[in-house]
Structure formats: structure tokens, C-alpha cells
Amino acid sequence: MAKSSSIESSSDSSRRGKLQPVDRREAYAEALARSGRQAAFDLLGVVRSAAEQAAQAWGAARPAGTSDVAAESGAFDYVYASESRVEVASDGVYHSVPLGERDASCEMRYVVVPREESHVYRMATIENPTSAPMLAGPVEVYVGGAYVLSTQLPTVAPRQRFKLGLGVEQAIKCARNARFEEKRTDSGVVATAELHHKIEIELVNNLGRKVRCEVRERIPQPAKNAEVVVDEGEVSPKWEEYTQRERRRIRGGRRWDVEIDAGARRELRAEYVVKIYAQNEVVGGNRREE
């Protein structure tokens, strides 16, 4: 009896026990042959064309304002389930697909920095009402069914609160006036100059409801080892220290948090004094307010 033998090449042995990529065109041709059917068209050509279109879709530019999900998601994965069936056209471009609706609590407040500009900005504090993260991307804001603006939504963890700027509120007006007076005193051993600054701010609420407004201010802070003293004077109503820790920290920040009735005016006042030796002058000029 003759014995048969086979020789296994080194290349075949190295591939044993490992998953190998399959040529899609060959796989389709083999499947068609096993079924006993014949294609009346160029099957490999169709598969090749589909593969090229798929490759082009991966390189399509994202819509303006959108973010790279893989980059934004970081170290977590999550599946977003749609509440209803949707159809997405296979045309190689991006489509907006609604996943569902959720109600979220919203706290509206207003912020103004009158030292920089008189515009009063709307600021909404919202809580993510879902158990899923909300990824960064564009958002359109409507109030009472009317379009307000388009802005960017940050990446928000489940149940986390975030702030969303909603542009300028034209119905709330802010005016800031500053007065300066320089006084010299010889009561001490060395003559000193006292630079008195008075700040007056007026807010007018032309909305039909009471609002809460945050007014941010800043007073000068002497450099380390500088021969300068800054004393706060009368402030009405009282303000609080503001370090702006949510952004770049600042020194000398102050803020008021006040309520203004519908159609009412609210006045804010603050005073501070910069004390220096009479023969000295503050860098940039003794007058710190314009």
C-alpha cells in the first residue's frame, strides 16, 4: 500500500490559529457560486465601487460646528438608542437623526461687566436630565417657539449642570459712571496722596418679570512690595469677592447679585481709595476709572 504524504509550507504554518482578513470580492464570488446562481453583471466591479464610496464617506468633512465624537468621548463608550425607527439615506453625507425628547430644569440669570461694556448677557444654567452623556456640538435655542440663536454645547456628564450663554438681553439696560478726586494729607510723618474713586451703576429692567442680575466689578490690587495701599470704602448694597475660578483667576474681583422687579431701577454704589506717597504716582496714572 502506498503512503501519501503532504508538505506544509512555513508560510501556511505561521497562519494557523490566526484570524486572517478576507477579500470581500472573493467572498461574494464564492457565496454566489455556492448558491448556484449566476450574476448578469460585473459583481466584482459593483463591490469595488461600493468599497470606494465607503472610503470616501469616511473622509467627508463634518458639518460646521460639530465635534469628533471619538476625541470628545475620551475613555467612555455609550450606546444612544432612538425612541423610534429612522431611515438614513446612504448618500455619503452627514444627517441629523432625532433620538428623543427630554425635559430639563433651567435657571435663567443675567450677567454684566459694566467696567468693560454695558451689554447684559443672558445665562441659562441647565441640568442634563438623562443618564447618558451629552456630547459637544451645535445647539439651536428657541424661546416660546421663536428662534433665538445657535451656539455650542459642551460635553456634559449625566445629571451634571452646565451654563449656556444666550446672547444679549436688550430689555435690561446698564449704565456705569465713575468719579475721581485726589486729596493730599500732611497729617502723618510723610505726606500722602489719597486717590478717591466712586463707582455708580444703574440697572433698568424693562422686562415684564422680576430678574436676577450678576454685576461684576474689579478694584485695583497693589503689586507685591509696592508702596501702595487700597482701602474699600462704602459699598451699597454689599458685594462679595469674585475670583472667577471657573475661568482664569483674577485678583480684586467683586460682584453684586441683585434682583430687579419688572419695570424697576436698581442703583449700585462702591468706593475705594488708593493711598500712595505724595511724591509718587501710580503707573498708568493716578486715575484708575474712566
Image (tube, rainbow, N blue to C red):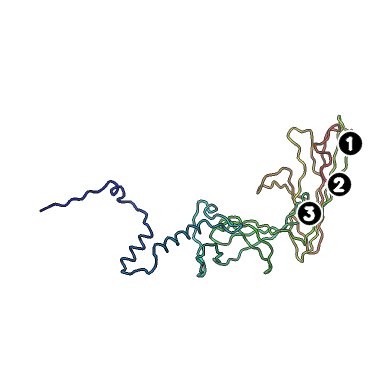
Q: Residue at x 61, y 57 (%)?
A: 65
Picture mark count: 3
Residue labelled with disc 2: 179
* Mark identifier at residue 66: none
Residue at the outermost left position: 1
Alpha-carbon distance for marks 2 and 3?
18 Å
Callout 3 crowding tier (Cα within 10 Å): few <14, some 14–19, many ≥20: some
Q: Residue at x 54, y 57 (%)?
A: 60
Alpha-carbon distance for marks 1 and 3?
33 Å
Indicate which label's residue lies in the foreground, 1 or 3: 3
Indicate which label's residue lies in the foreground, 2 or 1: 2
Can you say whether 280 is above or below 59 in the image? above
Dot 1: what SS? strand
- State the residue in front, 149 or 80: 149
Dot 2: what SS? strand
What's the residue type where badge 2 is placed? Arg
- Which quadrant of the figure has residue 133? bottom right
Q: Position of residue 90 (x, y in %)?
A: 50, 65
Residue labelled with disc 3: 118
Q: Tell me: 144 left or right of 266.
A: left
Can you say whether 221 is above or below 26 in the image? above
What's the residue type where badge 3 is placed? Ser
What's the residue type where badge 1 is placed? Arg
